[in-house]
Image (tube, grey):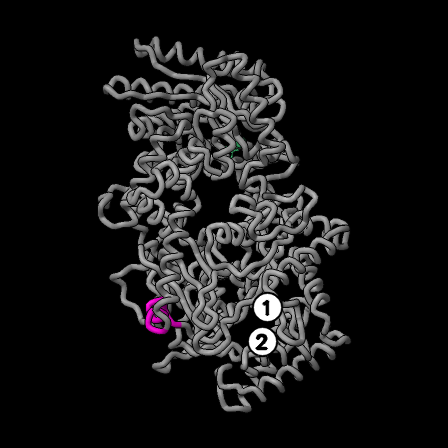
Amino acid sequence: MIDPVTSFVYDFSQGSKDQKDLLGGKGANLAEMTNLGLPVPPGFTITTEACRAYLEEGAEPAGLADEVTARLSALEETMGRRLGDPADPLLLSVRSGAKFSMPGMMETVLNIGLNDESVHGLARANSNERFAMDSYRRLLQMFGSTVLGIDSEVFAEALDELKEKRGTTADLDLDVEDLRGLVETFKGLIQSHVGRPFPQDPREQLDLAVRAVFDSWNTDRARLYRRQERIPEDLGTAVNVQVMVFGNRGMTSGSGVAFTRDPASGHRGVYGDYLQNAQGEDVVAGIRNTVTLADLGEIDKPAHDELLQIMDTLEKHYRDMCDIEFTIEDRKLWMLQTRVGKRTAAAAFRIAYMMADEGLIDLDEAVRRVHGAQLGQLMFPSFDESAARELLAKGMNASPGAAVGKAVFSSATAVEWAEKGEDVILIRKETNPDDLHGMVAARGILTSRGGKTSHAAVVARGMGRTCVCGAEAIDVDAKNRRFTTADGAEIAEGDLISIDGTTGHVYAGSVPVVPSSIVRWFEGELDATSDELVTAVAALMEHADKARRMLVRANADTPDDASRARRFGAQGIGLCRTEHMFLGERRELVEHLIVAENQSEQEKALDELLPLQRKDFAEIFKAMNGMPVTIRLIDPPLHEFLPDLTELSVDVALEEEHGEHDERHHQLLTAVRRLHEQNPMLGLRGVRLGIAIPGLFTMQARAILMAAADHLQANGDPRPEIMVPLVASVKELEIIKAKLEQVAREVEQERGITIPHKIGTMIEIPRAVVTADKIAKVAEFFSFGTNDLTQLTWGFSRDDVEAEFFSTYFEQGVFQVSPFESLDTEGVGSLVRTAVELGRKARPDLHLGVCGEHGGDPHSIHFFDQVGLDYVSCSPFRVPVARLEAGRAALGAE
Ligand code: PEP
Ligand code: MG
């Protein structure tokens, strides 16, 4: 039963896993586990709605405090203990939990309710004073850093100092007196850093901790993480308040994290880390080295067996790989968290495929669960097995990939060097949430401590960064910016190293890389059964292809690109940019055309270009035999084919000074001056060129149609589609179409055959959108040029703005991703929708596609599916990603 909508606080027994919006991921899953009858310590969740209200009003919303009081009383009644009771205190944990997991957004505060008095009650009730003192110092440490905002290093340093004094590196070697002293030290640190004592009132501790969770939504690192992961800014976080169970009550207690399958490889078999006599954060922080779940079986078989059974229950219930946090308190197992676990790209494909194979899910669901971005990652190269290399160390294969870069030992350096264009590998003993900037900037991350569930590993996997963690053989000396290996090898800042996140190997120098097995399979060099990953990808791609409604074409201008696109599964060419055929040696021929002083000179230049173009098209038709090939007539401003105005002016001036006179240079300079434009992207380009210099478009059309005729007569099946760029008015298209049809008639007559072809246009100017019905009467197809459409809708120069000021726009939340990268569905998308509707009304069989960069962007592809485009077109390398996403879109995946 759910309370009325005004409720800000839900007991765990009231929610379910489907309420992540309201209860956050952690809260929703705690509720789900509670309702599954699993051993979850009781507690309640303060909703994201309360957080949003707090962030808006700058104060806790009315009624929240009373609701917390009521829930707390109920909890106290259930437990038979009161929060912070000096005799036998009930203690609570406070944890953040947003809809999407955000590692490191806010650390947990444990042991709320302890103070100078109740710490003795805890000691007495458990007959364990060391445990009570250890719990209190943890509260002071976590509260001090997380709630009161004191640098966590302050506490860590005091702890390290004490350990050094005692001649140990292990927390467990500290005795009661040490911990009692540490409690006093920590209290003193709090007083001196914030000018007030640690709050002794348990309820005040609770309220401050809840408020700190709310506030943590807006810390720099949370914002950065959201931007990186494209998580909306306005969701807010829930707060989970839960009865404490203790993993630090001696050696019969402990904490652990586990996965129901290997999150790195996707292989079956449970996987996890356990740490005896420890509270949760110790495991993830990599502070001490953990043992495996198999070892837990030796330490405490009943708890181990129960855990495995619960993991099995969870995997079957969620029908997915789950990750789990658990605590064993004096041999009793408690579940503290579960969620569908983060995984590497390879694991995502394997797990989805295997679960379908096991009958846990169907293939539709398997395809919904893998992402184009993950497929993209699998298409990256890996290290060449046969290359000579010097192995420096072996760590854990925490996040796959092959990364090469210069060694850096701080996040600040990583950012600084990356901004200068250097590839860097960030090397740390262990990472913490403050390293997020550095991790984003680095090609790969290497740590010497911590397991596959350490911060470095979890965050790197989430970002798709290569990561090797826990490489214990290296001794990281961050201060002196170097590390040394067990064998005495030394790597200093700036030295090149290579890390293999798939095997965990760390190499000196730059190891050569080889293409991915997935790419080799697409290329036809490997068989689908060659390895498990290829098998999984092949099966899911096949299913996505069956499911998808949209076709996928490629943007390709050369026969090589066209052939590759075809091997990667392209069903045609959606954009052949013919201007790319005028570069290199042919540039001079274009120059001749531009500087031509009369019609006959112009025709001569065009005659020289014609056979070259005809050969280009013939090769592409051959590569794409039987498939549509959309050829766009020349688009960019002509001055792009001419020398730079300043350089040429200097050359001519120098020549004059030396008494030389080069007539050609003079002519060129005149042409360059004539064609110079303040805003070339808004100037003489696209269809305007076709109207101003008619011979150019007709030469291209003739070359296309002659090549098609050649191919036809060689028993080929050419399907040319001639596309006119940058049309704003139907009149422009009418003028050009008449000329193109005239050429078609001529070529058909000359060759005595009918040449199948279509004539259509790009839709990339807002005026074309709003008059799309008129244009559709003339055009047989539309292809959305969303690059220019974005440029012209926002009024953003596509060549300048991203570098100029987009980072400020991201920071201020104008948008989270560049509209040039992922379609602005609200603005530009609504224009696309309008043009589709108007166009189809005027011509029901109008063929519709997109060939802007967005054609290869997963999020945009889903939008294009929704508005009913017939195909997307993207670069050859993105074709598999687009195929998968088109399949996922058809299957209703988000
Ligand atoms: C576009 O504008 O989206 C497009 C595909 O054309 P170009 O990028 O060549 O301007
Ligand atoms: Mg364009």
Residue at mark 2: 135
Decide whether residue 811 is among the magenta residues: no
The N terminus sits in image quarter = top right
Percent coordinates x, y for residue 301 in the rendering? 34, 69
Verify CB contact (< 8 Å) between mark 2 and mark 1.
yes
Which numbered disc flags the more N-terminal residue, 2 or 1?
1
Q: CA distance from mark 2 to mark 1?
A: 8 Å
- Left or right of residue 296, residue 839 in this image: right
Asked if residue 508 is positioned above or below residue 543 in the image, the reply reads below
- Left or right of residue 39, residue 193 in this image: right
Q: Secondary structure at mark 1?
A: strand
Percent coordinates x, y for residue 210 in the rendering? 67, 60
When asked about the image quadrant of residue 741, the answer is top left
Asked if residue 84 is positioned above or below residue 708 in the image, the reply reads below
Residue at (41, 25) in percent of width and height: 630
The answer, for residue 581, to whether it is visible in the render is no
The answer, for residue 136, to whether it is visible in the render is yes
Q: Secondary structure at mark 2?
A: helix
Residue at (62, 50) in percent of width and height: 10
Residue at (60, 77) in percent of width and height: 122
Question: Which numbered tag is attached to residue 685?
Answer: none
Percent coordinates x, y for residue 478 in the rendering? 51, 76
Residue at mark 1: 110
The magenta segment is 291-299
When asked about the image quadrant of residue 241, the answer is bottom right
Question: 439 and 682: which one is in front?
Answer: 439
When asked about the image quadrant of residue 684, the answer is top right
Q: Disc 2 residue type?
A: Ser
Question: 699 and 881: which one is in front?
Answer: 881
Percent coordinates x, y for residue 621 in the rendering? 32, 26
User: Mark 2: is the Cβ under 8 angstroms from ligand 1?
Assistant: no
- Left or right of residue 214, residue 404 in this image: left
